[in-house]
Image (tube, rainbow, N blue to C red):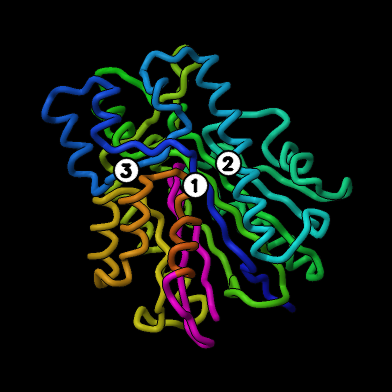
Amino acid sequence: MPTPKITAVATATPPHRYTQADIMDAAGYTDAQRRAFFERSDIESRYLWIPRERLRPDESVDELAARARDGALALSETAARRALERAGWQAADVDFVVTTTCTARLTPSVDAHLVGRLGCRPDVQRAHIGDTGCASAMVALQQAWNHLRAFPSHRALLVSVEICSAAYFLDDRLESAVANAIFADGAGALALSTEGPGPRVVTHRTLFRPEHLDAMGFEYPGGRPRVILSKDVRRIGATMLGEMVRVLMDAQGLKREDVRYWVLHSAGRRVLDRARTLLELDDAVMRHSRSVLRRYGNMSSATILFVLEEMLREESPVPGEWGVMVGLGPGFAAEGALLSW
């Protein structure tokens, strides 16, 4: 049976770039502890769907929702069009559209808007994956993979978009300051088919640990989204990332040294540090995840597509080489895929 391939990958960011100092000042953080979250994050800059003259912490719930909607629709369309162009496709060539976001709640959902904005066929099949957090793009990849296995002649478009700045929250909780120090806005898109060039997605796996349901997610006091981010996430995330890597390698009888390329979710500095130690990786194979964290921050589900794009742009995989791609999200979940060339 033909194996789905990643034909093209593309990303998009807002036009507004901010340094960590810009965001600290806008939030009004003056104490050493909260400022340290920003200064020790290994993040130099982030992109937010907020014009510089409106960088303020007092937006209403309605203003946040409107900004999340506008940003999500604009960035998802830009990323999707770039992916289609790189694949050499027209929108009418797409048979299946799958989208995901956990920060921009829309009804109709993002997929429905994209069908109209891109000019897809009226019979295009679609799905939307919502509220699965930073692992959402990998969950969406699973759905695209399943569709292409069922319909090998089809073409699929995956789009992940997050406006994390719509969930910024100022209160006395340290976890709110941590969230404000790392999360950012962006979108990524994949074009997938069973033909042509590109890495094969050999298999995918899910690892779920519901005993950690309370470790990460959103709550909505007064209708305003607020991040739940336990300090245990760095330990849980790194451990489950390591477990997922073993599951993926076992699926093909691989050893760690057989894997050349590592596409790991840039969750944060400490998660990456722990993952590096657990997996016994060197700095060279971690550089793409660290580079994306440094230049873009954590864009929730879209982040791993930025890591994939950078890896494919800067590396030159040859036939016979292997890669792993792992996202982490609330639940707590690790979602992974095994790539081959």
Disc nearer the start of the sequence (3/1): 3
Most distant residue in the right direction: 123
Badge 2 element: helix
| Residue underneath mark 1 | 301
Instruction: Check the image and report above or below for 137 versus 68.
Output: below
Q: Where's the N terminus, which quadrant?
A: bottom right
Disc nearer the start of the sequence (1/2): 2
Q: Is residue 328 magenta?
A: yes
| Closer to the camera in the image, 90 or 337 | 90
> What residue is rendered at 46% in x and 79% in y?
316
Instruction: Check the image and report above or below for 221 versus 118.
Output: above
Q: Is residue 50 left or right of residue 229?
A: right
Q: Which residues are magenta?
A: 314-341
What mark, if any, has residue 195 been given in the picture? Answer: none
Disc nearer the start of the sequence (3/2): 3
- Give coordinates of residue 110: x percent, y percent: 67, 38
> What residue is rendered at 34% in x and 35% in y?
229
Q: Amino acid at mark 3?
A: Ser
| Closer to the camera in the image, 133 or 300 | 300
